[in-house]
Structures are given as C-alpha cells and as structure tokens.
Image (cartoon, grey):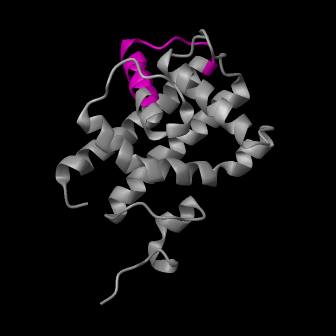
Amino acid sequence: MEDMGLTGKLFETSLKFQLASMWLQKISAGESADEEGKNILSWIGVLLREIDWSSNIPTRTSVGGGLSVQATTVRPTFYSSLIRIAPKFKEAGFTTERDILNFLSNLYYNLLSHGTPGRGHKKLNSSESELGVLLLQEISESILIQLNNNGLPWTSKSLKDEWEPLKNELYTFTA
C-alpha cells in the first residue's frame, strides 16, 4: 500500500473487526458490552452495512468519506471471507442465499444494537453468534494479510493461499 493514511485506516479497521468479534463472543456468553464495546460494535455494524449493499438496512445518517473509502477498500475482502466460510454456512443449516442474507442482516442489526433484540431482527443464537465471530475474524485476518503482503485484495481459495503467496498463483511479481 502506497498511501500510509489508508494503510493506517485499514489496520485500525482490522483491529476493530477483531475487537467486535471478541465483544460478540462476550454478548453470546451473556455479558453486556461496556461503552467502548458498544462503540466498536456500532462502528463495525455501520461499516458492514456500507460494505454489503444487499443488506437493505436503512441508513439513519450519512457516512463520512473516510468510512466510504474504508468500505470500498474492504468490500472485496468481505466477499472473499464469505466464500471461505461458505462450508460453515452449510453446516449451520443455511442452504439458500436468502438464509445467508437473513443471517447477515441479523448480524448487522445485532452489532448495531449491541446484541439486544429489537424491531425487525432477532438476537443471534449461540451457533449464529459463533458464525458471526468467525466471519469478523476472517475479515480482520484478511485485512492484515493484505497489509503484510503490501498489495491489493486477492481472490484466493483459502487463507493459507494468502499467507504463502510465493507458493501459488497469487505471487504476481515478475522481474
């Protein structure tokens, strides 16, 4: 990444995804988020709403340009993370695209509401929370890998491909 400002923002984004996954685990275990946790969960919920255009979650306020740039930059990572955890969706019983979209929508609402049920969505059960935690962790790790490899998002079959770019077709450097 040439732009150090964007690199810093992406590192911050990765950290927030990791913290949100931690808070989602705690909420699933019956704990309540503190003020910092609520802020992180809300921020990730807003970011995911901006990333995932299929969520159909109404926006209450307009987002700033910085968040739009982060959402645009992270969008390919989000979708590649969904592809990587697709087998977990099947294990959880999500067999159709609509099932997955409903899960994602509930995940975003749960992040925005700090894990409390509300109008139009339900509280995630423990297996759904685990799946949400996995997705948030996948996104976080993928962002860090991109920063570490100093390049743009890659289409890969597994996270291992991204860790070892010299051993696969992801290595694009030519002399």
Q: What main secondary structure does the magenta stretch of the protein show? A: helix
Quadrant showing the C terminus:
bottom left
Q: In this view, does 123 lie above or below 156?
A: above
Residue 121 counted in the magenta span: no
Residue 61 as seen in the image, left or right of residue 55: left
Q: Is residue 44 magenta?
A: yes
Residue 125: x %, y % from top left: 71, 22
Quarter of the image that includes the N terminus: bottom left
Viewer-proximal residue among 71 and 19: 71
Closest to the observer: 104 or 57?
A: 57
Q: In this view, does 146 lie above or below 88?
A: below
Residue 13's x, y, as percent?
35, 39
- List the single residue furthest toward the bottom: 175
Give the residue drawn at x 41%, y 57%.
145
Residue 11 visible in the current orientation: no
Magenta-colored span:
28-45
Q: Identify the residue at image location x=25%, y=51%.
A: 7
Q: Position of residue 73 (x, y in %)?
A: 36, 50
Q: How many marks?
A: 0
Question: Above or below — where is 25 with respect to 170?
Answer: above
**Residue 95 visible from this viewpoint:** yes
Q: Relative to 98, is 53 on the left or the right? A: left
Task: Name which residue lies at 30% across and 36% down.
Answer: 67
Q: Find residue 167 and report its horizontal and vertical position in percent.
A: 51, 79
Q: At 31% across and 28% down in the image, what residue appears?
A: 63
Q: In which quarter of the image is residue 54?
A: top right
